[in-house]
Amino acid sequence: MIVAERKTIPELVEILNGHKKILVLGCGTCVTVCLAGGEREVSIISSALRIASNIRKLDFEIEELTIERQCDNVFIEQATEAIERNDVVLSLGCGAGVQAIAERFLEKPVYAGLNTEFIGVLEERGIWTEKCAACGACVLHQYGGICPITRCAKHMLNGPCGGSREDRCEVRPDRPCAWQLIYQRLKGIGQLDRLKKIAPPKNWETSLDGGCRVIIREDHRI
Amino acid sequence: MTHESQLAKKIDAGDFIVTAEFLPRASTDISEIEAIAASFKDKVTAVNVADNPHGPVLSSLAGSLALLKAGVEPVYQMVTRDRNRIAIQSDLLGAAALGIRNVLCLSGHHQTLTKSSQSANVYDIDSVQLIAAVKQMRDKGVLLDGTKIKGDFPVLIGAVAGPDMKPMELNIMRLAKKVEAGAGFIQTQAVFDIETFENWLEQARSRELTKKTAILPGVMPLESAEKAEALREKYMDLFIPDSIISRLKEAGDAAAQQKEGLAICIEIIKKIKAMEGVKGIHILSGGRENMVPEIIAKSEL
Ligand code: SF4
Ligand code: SF4
């Protein structure tokens, strides 16, 4: 899923300062699961903004709404009336959700209330970790299911860097070295031989480096 | 201007090799490099020029060329952290055209460990892919995209290994891959733990890697217990055992600790230089280039 974090209330106040009627719009999908932008957070953030508005005399009038998915037209339609009766939208969707709303309401300022962080998983209660950088040409099958692009800070495809430790990555003491995990996993499944072959430079054209991507499925366009 | 790598020649001849590391500064004063070149001249086979290890400084390409001009053979270090394959190959062509004959290929410390921790991450290719790219340019005369190179590209390729990196199986696998990709010499991270180094070397020997590449173990003079602790805390590729830190501490004041650091370095050189499979010594000055001549003299290199 997409994992995001809330911007701080002072940041949000700064962004919204000068506006009156504000729709705080949550999303019921990824950001609900990662506890950043669902119905609950819409309510918490709205309350905090109301308090800030009272203290600083900002005159905010806040309406709350959460739709199933902000990145999907069908659901966005359900928010149309609420969006139209407010001056601005503070979207608690991921970066894709914010843009989907903004592109459909051209005269309406739409602001991001979250910092969208990564594609990842809930590791354990309260801890989310990044797993995939959406490179567009998945190589997981070669690396025992551990992504060297995302989880190795240097995208090493041929083995660890010199700073690899059994219990940590050179870059961050709180993260394991992806290459130690790849090694253990390949050893465990009897595929260590995969590491002996030199992996050629990756084609980054399929990733964001090749420009903003689009998928066209002709079979779905009929 | 020399047109053959003296380092390569010595490796082929089986001569004992001494290389040393020079860290360029954030400086445009070429006389500093000339002074360092003069102090190294005729004492070492070649001098490594580090590629922005701790943040932006004078480029390793310019530093290498300055050494060359001053009559010292450079080992041009190139990390894959800052340049994509376009910039890398372009710099390599320039280096070869202007007489650089040794290239050390490495991934480099991650940018977050440098003073420019906010900079973007490149890592388009990794160290093994860089080695293979340089080999392809040299042996096949073509760039990664297939473009034919006009003229020779006669460079000796080097790579880095860390004897202390665990597990050993993964460590040796990585070393073997670098050698297979084309590394003609291997400079190691600084050795402090003789036993671990011996074990690593034995593993390399048993796979005949010491026959296929020239192993030049790294040594580093430590300045003080405090600095040594800070170094090992920050750089995960550096393993300094507690026993070494204690020895430095027990030596006494700053001057005594510095002397002890030098003594430890010389001791290590004497212990490892005659080991089977060791073809030379690489002195990691860590920016204290003035220590190098004394280390060479006192360890009878
Ligand atoms: S290889 Fe690419 S697509 Fe596959 S997990 Fe890694 S970043 Fe994601
Ligand atoms: S320590 Fe491991 S994960 Fe971290 S950069 Fe090095 S190889 Fe990649």
Image (tube, coloured by chain):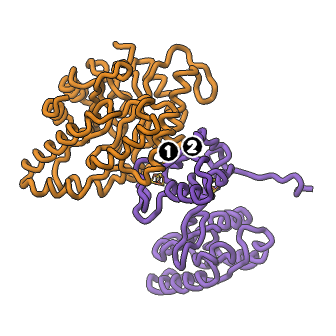
Chain colours: A purple, B orange
Residue situated in front as seen by the camera: B57 or A133: A133
Q: Quadrant of residue B296?
A: top left
Instruction: Give the x, y percent position of residue B82.
Output: 46, 41
Amino acid, disc 1: Met
Element assignment for label 1 = helix
Residue B34 appears left or right of B178: left
Label 2 belongs to which residue? A196
Residue at mark 1 to residue at mark 2: CA–CA distance = 7 Å
Query: Does residue B286 sit above or below B65 in this rendering?
Result: below
Q: Chain of mark 2?
A: A
Instruction: Give the x, y percent position of residue A36.
Output: 58, 76
Instruction: Give the x, y percent position of residue B184.
Output: 43, 28
Q: Quadrant of the N terminus of chain A?
A: bottom right
Instruction: Give the x, y percent position of residue B209.
Output: 44, 35
Q: Are marks 1 and 2 on the same chain?
A: no
Residue A56 appears left or right of B295: right
Query: Does residue B81 sit above or below B28 in this rendering?
Result: below
Residue A48 appears left or right of B228: right
Q: Quadrant of residue A45?
A: bottom right
Dot label at residue B173: 1
Residue situated in front as seen by the camera: A166 or A139: A166
